[in-house]
Image (cartoon, rainbow, N blue to C red):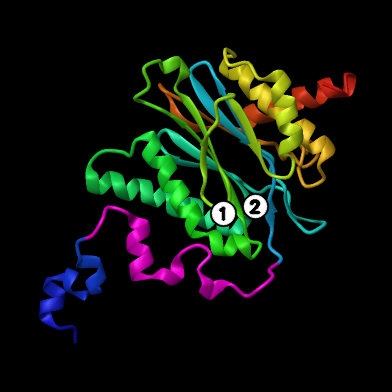
Amino acid sequence: MEPSSTRNFPGQALPPAYLTPGSSSFTDFLRSAAPELMPGHPENDTGQVDAPHGTTIVALTFRGGVLLAGDRRATMGNLIAQRDMEKLYVTDAYSAVGIAGTAGIAMEMVRLYSIELEHYEKLEGVPLSLDGKTNKLATMLRGNLQSAIAGLAVLPLFAGYDVDAQDPERAGRIVTYDITGGRYNETAGYHAVGSGSVFAKSALKKRHDPDADLDSAIRNAVESLYDAADDDTATGGPDLSRQIYPSVVTITGPEGAVRLPEDQTAAVAEEVVSRRREIPGG
């Protein structure tokens, strides 16, 4: 029979780590209490691993916000591992992260990152600043360096809306990273990561307009993904026969981070494909 003291005081059944005061970082707590659950923990490294990889993610600013868009294909070597993979994650009310690289570790890292932001807000009573969010992601990425050296690299692309910005029309932010956790503010207003990033960035270099409205920005993002898929076999273009379309997350002051409904992205994608039938070069 359960001791009456434990039944009356459920907290006494928890391990001491749960009741020990510490920092407000959930990652720090997990690293000390259950390190085997951390993404890319050495215990899980078994040498060379063939795992699905996510490919192309783009981010661009527009008047009043910023958006992320990504294709849906995951590859494993020369094979298509998945055709409808989701690579964009809304991480809190005003931020989102797109992932490229080793899919399993990347998804685990972003989920932990979302919990980290929520955990901080619950303990501190206020959300992290935008700089704090990007630094937190850099720290987590740095913790994955050992796995990255072993070939299991993760490359996130952060997009967020700075609620403390003086000009709400220019509050969209893009932050990029390298595999060592290096953090870089993107000032050109657009960026791309993944195997098709070279082609996507070339398209955005010509199409990006910082004064564009939301609809134009969405179309420019889908156009850049189409160009990436046209030249990179690991990037999937709009698949009209299977009804698989790119994912888009928009972040603005009034609406926050919102995933675009699939029927809306489908309409944009079908319009882009229809136009490319007439003008293949875009």
- Element type where label 2 sits in the image: strand
Q: Is residue 194 above or below residue 282?
A: below
Q: What is the number of the mark on residue 266? A: none
- Front position in the image: 239 or 59: 59
Are the residues tagged 2 and 1 within 8 Å (C-beta)?
yes
Q: What is the number of the mark on residue 106? A: 1
Q: Does the rendering let one see residue 48?
A: yes
Where is residue 263 drawn, in percent x and y?
64, 30
- Front position in the image: 167 or 94: 167
Which residue is found at the position 76% from the left and 43% from the top?
235
The range drawn in magenta is 22-49
Q: Is residue 93 above or below residue 203?
A: below
Q: Does the rendering let one see residue 223?
A: no
Q: What is the number of the mark on residue 101? A: 2
From the viewer's perspective, tell me whether residue 213 is left or right of residue 111.
right
Q: CA distance from mark 2 to mark 1?
A: 7 Å
Q: Kindly identify the amino acid type of the residue bearing the numbered disc 2.
A: Gly
